[in-house]
Image: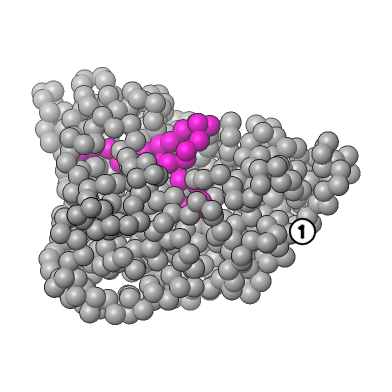
Amino acid sequence: MPPPADDSTSRFALRGRLVTLDPDDTVIEDGILYGSGRLIEALRPATAEAPPGFEQIVPVETGGTVYPGLIELHNHLPYGVLPLWQVPKKYGNRSQWGGSRNPAYHGLVTGPMTVLGQDPQLMPAVVRYVEAKALVNGTTTSQGIALFSNTGARRMYRGVIRNIEQTDDADLPEASSRIADVEATDAEQFVGRLNKSRRLLLHLAEGTDDDARAHFQALEFQPGKWAITENLVGIHCTALTASDFEILARHGGSMVWSPLSNLLLYGRTADIAAAKKAHVLMGLGSDWSVSGSKGLLGELKAARLASAAAGDVFTDQELVAMATRDAARILRWDQALGSLRPGLRADVLVVDGIAGDPYTTLIDTRDTGVQLVMIDGVARYGTRKLLQLLAPGAPLEEPVSGAPADRALNLRDPSADPVVAGLTLAEATRRLSTALADLPLLASRADRAPLAEAPLMEVPDAEVPDAEVPDAEVPDAEVPDTEAPDTEVRWQLALDEVLPTGAELRPRLPLLTAAGTPQPTGPDIGPAPTPLAEAVQAPVTLDGLTASADIAFLTALAHEANLPADYGAELSRLLS
């Protein structure tokens, strides 16, 4: 992300209960966080003297509890415009519900996202909306939004929340969430990618059946040799056994837990007790809105319920660490983010309340209780009063749909990505709501007049394997906002589950047979049906920004058939 919009010498002070998530788990019941520009300068009790240079700075009274900003390690962000799916049955693996054998999936996901993702007016609206959705749910870092053009160029969207895949910051090593097709299917090349310096966050053992587990077993590319290093971060890991987790931990691998999505699709989540016993380092991800939480505030509640059902595996403190300090450790960001400590980046979340257990306070917080979200020392979301004090002169956007009336957004960014420059959340919401209501008509029009001559995301395999930054190959200076000499450049969303991309989200290494010979693994994800009108035959409702104001979401959640008894109703209650 770009440097903060405000002057780098600006100073601020926030007063409240400080939950640092530092190595000693320090909590200052009444403290002041002092910041200068993008950095935290000091944390002191409110009765202590201000540090040099802050003598004249009047602390902003938050009246709440202050935490590090929430770090989300897995979210298919563009899909955040789609509503929660009423999952009809329990599935065994990813392809059973996401492949071509499930027409309902194409009507809800593939078709709508293809229409939205390639339209020059709707694609920017998607980007603006889902980034605002992350902010209002307390998230300061998430996975990125990839963009592709009809010329074959590819890059990551530059936004106001941090993107783990493109940080432009040496202190925040960039991770990858996809690898070249050849690396996903060839064990030697996969190991070669793991031995580079970049973390790989890849879907792994996604499901509960033997086919899902086979994708983990395939990491044993030779007898006794595993394609696992500290660079492998497995997403979901629902099919892993206790012995599998021991192997993952022994080789330095970590995992991302998405309990709500796992339960909705498969009726169970990862064996977290076994993962904890094996000392697997874990982070959290809400996955996507189709079968998950709206953000990490919701996923923390889902995780607590899942932990309780498994025998109270994690304390509230351990769960909060997954969304802050431990997530930073997984990314190798812990010397820059994930805690409130002097010298670290001023990514801050403030919520209502200063009583009771400080970690329970965060998990219990509804989205209505988010008072402030700061990224790199810049106030991005919160109460109008706090934003006016901390970002004076910034053009605030208010009201924010679904949030309390006094909440506002600060989306000012001098280096705003050209795809959304000047687009307000209100206008993005209007465009998306209108388009989703008219989706069948738009799908028919798209069939008659495709946006671009070149297929979406047509990138030859040869262009990806040796690139150190496969998802951000186009420098900022090359991002066009005018016509190229002979081709009008049109940017489109890189949709993970719609068309072949030349890059994989899931390793497909060959599985060793009993004889030690490789055997290809599956299953594969089928393509979307064409024409689009065959998939999209009904309108879709835009997913709300917040859970507490989204009655349709809360009702659907309470009636999801695959969730454990009372889980959906209890989670709905905790969110409302």
Going 69% across and 39% down the picture, which residue do you hit? 40
Residue at 47 percent of width and 40 percent of height: 167
Color encoding of the figure: one colour
Residue identifier under label 1: 63
Q: Picture quarter containing residue 98?
A: bottom left
Task: Examine the rendered structure and indicate whether residue 164 appears above or below residue 549.
Answer: above
Q: Position of residue 141 (x, y in %)?
A: 50, 47
Q: Residue at x 24, y 42 (%)?
A: 503
177 in magenta: yes
* In the image, residue 420 lies in the stretch drawn in magenta: no
Q: Main secondary structure of the magenta part?
A: loop
What is the residue that sits farthest to the front in this orientation?
485
Region in magenta: 159-181
Image coords of residue 506 (percent x, y): 26, 42
Say if 21 sits above or below 426 in the image: above
Does the rendering let one see residue 237? no
Amino acid type of the residue that numbered disc 1 sits on in the rendered structure: Gly
